[in-house]
Amino acid sequence: MKTSMWLAGLIAAGCLVAATAGAETWDALGEDQQKILSQLQDQWDSLPAERQDKLAQGAARWSAMDSEQRAQAQGRFQRWQSLTPDQKERIRARYQRFRDLPAGEKTRIRENYRRYQNMPQEQRERLQDRWRNLSPQERDQMRDRMRNMTPEQRDRMRDRRGRGTGSGPKRGAS
């Protein structure tokens, strides 16, 4: 009987430890983190451990940013706050689909995004205009073609089109 009571107590203690694992006390946070999260001090102990971890990590990232990075982050946050709940949900769903992609596909998408960001503004605008002028069906066809191409085929297509400058064949021209 004593053994089973001791075992039950040990299991209960293990459950308690598991439930609070990862939870940080307010005092365990760094000074910068406490300053950033000061509005949450009174409710900190009642927050779920996962939420505490995310907040602590976010505060650590914030304190490591320079003023320009902070301004960019604030701008992104303000844009996020201005979105409708439906827009936010679509973005979350798209992000989850991205996270579920194979590593190679995610790398390809990131490389394409970096290449796009490095384009001159005028070139990006031409590319955006071309995309906007496609019908939904044409966009779907374009996505399917690009997904099914090898990296070498995509590079050859970019080379033929002058690396996306719009110098390739015009839509509807044959």
Image: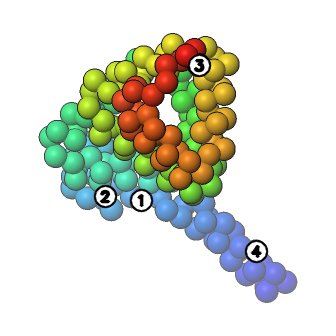
Where residue 159 appears, as percent x and y from the top left, is 43, 42
Q: Mark 2 or 1 closer to N-term?
A: 1
Number of the label disc, if any, that sits on residue 8: 4
Residue 40 occupies quadrant:
top left
Residue 7 occupies quadrant:
bottom right
Q: Mark 3 or 2 closer to N-term?
A: 2
Circle nearer the viewer, 4 or 2: 2
- The secondary structure type at the circle numbered 1 is loop
Q: Mark 4 or 2 closer to N-term?
A: 4
Q: Which residue is mark 1?
A: 24
Q: Quote the CA–CA distance across marks 4 and 3.
A: 78 Å
Direction from residue 131 to residue 116 in the image, left or right: left
Q: Which residue is mark 2?
A: 29
Question: CB under 8 Å between callouts 2 and 1?
Answer: yes
Q: In this orientation, which residue lies closer to the viewer: 113 or 4? A: 113
Q: Quote the CA–CA distance across marks 2 and 1.
A: 7 Å
Which amino acid does the dot numbered 3 rest on? Ser
Look at 84% across and 83% down and name the residue there: 1
Q: Which residue is mark 3?
A: 174
Direction from residue 11 to residue 49 in the image, left or right: left
Look at 49% across and 15% down and name the residue there: 132
Q: Mark 4 or 1 closer to N-term?
A: 4
